[in-house]
Amino acid sequence: MWVPARRHPLALSESKMKKPSWHELRSSREVAAVCALAFAAACTGALGDTTDGPGESSSSAGGDGASTGSDPPQFQPAAGMLRRLTRTQFRNAVRDMLGVEVDIHQLDADSWNGNFAVIGAATVVTSERGVEQYHAAIEGAVDAVFADPARRDQFIGCAPSGAEDDACVRGFIEAQGRRAWRRPLEAAEVDRLAAVAAKAAAELESAVEGARWATVALFTSPNFLYRPELGAPSADGSLRLTGYEMASRLAFLVWNSLPDQELLDQAASGALGTVEGIRAAATRLLEAPAGREAVGAFAEEYMRLDRISTQAKDAGLFPEYSPALQAAMIRDMRGTWEVLAFDDQASALELFSTTKAVVNTELAQLYGLDTAGLGSGAFEVRSLPADGPRIGILSKAGFLSQFANQKEGSPTLRGKFMRDALMCTPIPPPPGDVALELPEPPADKPLTKRQRLEIHRTEPACAGCHSFMDPLGLPLETFDAIGRFRTTDHGLPIDPSGEFDGVPVADARALGVTLSESASVAECLVRKYYMYAAGHEERKVDKRVLDALTASFEGSGYKLRELVLDVVTNDAFSSVAPQP
């Protein structure tokens, strides 16, 4: 019996970026010195092999977006890319087209570049096994639709005959294909898919089966799984995204899914060729229920919430650490970003001082809140105690549980994330010959984590980098490995004092308040969102764009919705350079 081919040539070559080698450093003293230099250079943009070339990323410790004392270079667009849908985008696209949820954990993993899956999407390699996984997911989703006659008939929209020139099937392919592939299908493409339907109908003696296999072929095509952003010559000779590429880029940024028919119609009419048209389209997308994805999906990648479900904890110490609690941690973090941006339309800096939380029963219990009216699947926005120890997103279990081991939290990992994600001054990895584990103290002489870290920092190879990380993370020591509040560590009182950017902070609350007043944190947020939206790591030639976006972000009162609109209407979002 004939069946359509189950594999497609989906694999792309993975580009490699040269990383600094810290194993060649000659002494532990030199390690500490280089770490200090790397930190300073991240603030000044002076370190590393940077380039002005289009599409090339800085390999410096902190990107190269800051001024070096001279005028920043002229902006140059990044090279056009072919991007595979992230696992979340694939799930959302299948759901929006077929009404079926797929298990993304059964798919090839995303590739994370610049700490974003959407950037890694341009270099990810789809394995042979991965192709089979995508095919199985699509076939399962299509089977679910076609197993229900009423649902199937609504999806097809007509009665297929199985004939080679079946007008029903051809019209169905054109209509569904336009949205699935984010552009109109060419005549030859429709012919090929119609031939799949006719052959399957003949072999299986069922016109419906023919339509089913045509649907499988439509969605297993690379045209569904990959997003081209290659551009076309404009009137002035520069390369700009086509109308359909812009529709796709807007939809996947704001909805994290496919464009709808209205957006595709705007692409066809040329409305997305002007700044006004793009702003109007993006505003409509933001105002739709799915528009919350513009912030929620960014928060999920930015805060690396994907790691929560992979963090094992000691079951004896944390019996409540269940899949329901882990899912609630993700929902809480995403939900808080969305509430502040869309419901409250508050400053993004309030993320660090808010007392709002999105909780279910399990998370409310962890936070010490009343669980009345809640359930494992019933979430509500609640307020934490105004004078309580927990404030802002850094006091949320979704952050604290990530940067911890199975038994205890890690000030170093928490501080390292803050340096990288919130301050845009990443710390280089340690040399390979440095012990990363803190020695356990004798049972009869307990030590707090702070005391153990102080001993660890007496090693010259450790002192330099740890001095930039630990003071940031120590105020969060009042929260354990899953984010529960505590006042003692190994029976000893916890000293939660620390430091943010040279400013002493007394505890987690003071840390959150200090971050909520930091213009440098706001500037870093702009840099991170620009990377996420543009789909490439920060380059020296992006500085003028970033300066303009930072100024407008400040002028808006640090409103995240306004940042989204400013990014998509900036020329950098719609222009590309030729592929190398």
Image (cartoon, rainbow, N blue to C red):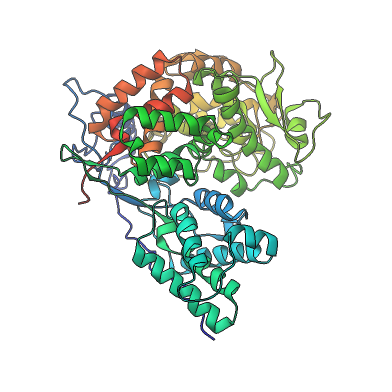
Horizontally, is 129 left or right of 25 in the view?
right
Residue under the point 77% across and 32% down: 365
Q: Position of residue 460 (x, y in %)?
A: 38, 33
Instruction: From the viewer's side, name the closer residue of 426 and 536.
Output: 536
Q: Is residue 163 above or below residue 446?
A: below
Residue under the point 54% across and 78% down: 201
Residue under the point 18% across and 36% down: 52
Residue with the most extreme right position: 372
Q: Hey, which quadrant is residue 546 in on the image?
A: top left
Q: Position of residue 431 (x, y in %)?
A: 37, 44
Instruction: From the viewer's side, name the closer residue of 507 and 6.
Output: 6
Q: Position of residue 70 (x, y in %)?
A: 16, 21
Does residue 101 appear in this view? yes
Q: Is residue 460 above or below residue 577?
A: above
Q: What is the count of numbered marks?
A: 0
Q: Hey, which quadrant is residue 476 in on the image?
A: top right
Q: Is residue 552 above or below residue 249?
A: above
Horizontally, is 234 left or right of 140 in the view?
left
Q: Position of residue 381 (x, y in %)?
A: 70, 26
Horizontally, is 196 left or right of 83 in the view?
right
Instruction: From the viewer's side, name the closer residue of 536 and 163.
Output: 163
Q: Quadrant of the N terminus?
A: bottom right
Does residue 148 appear in this view? no
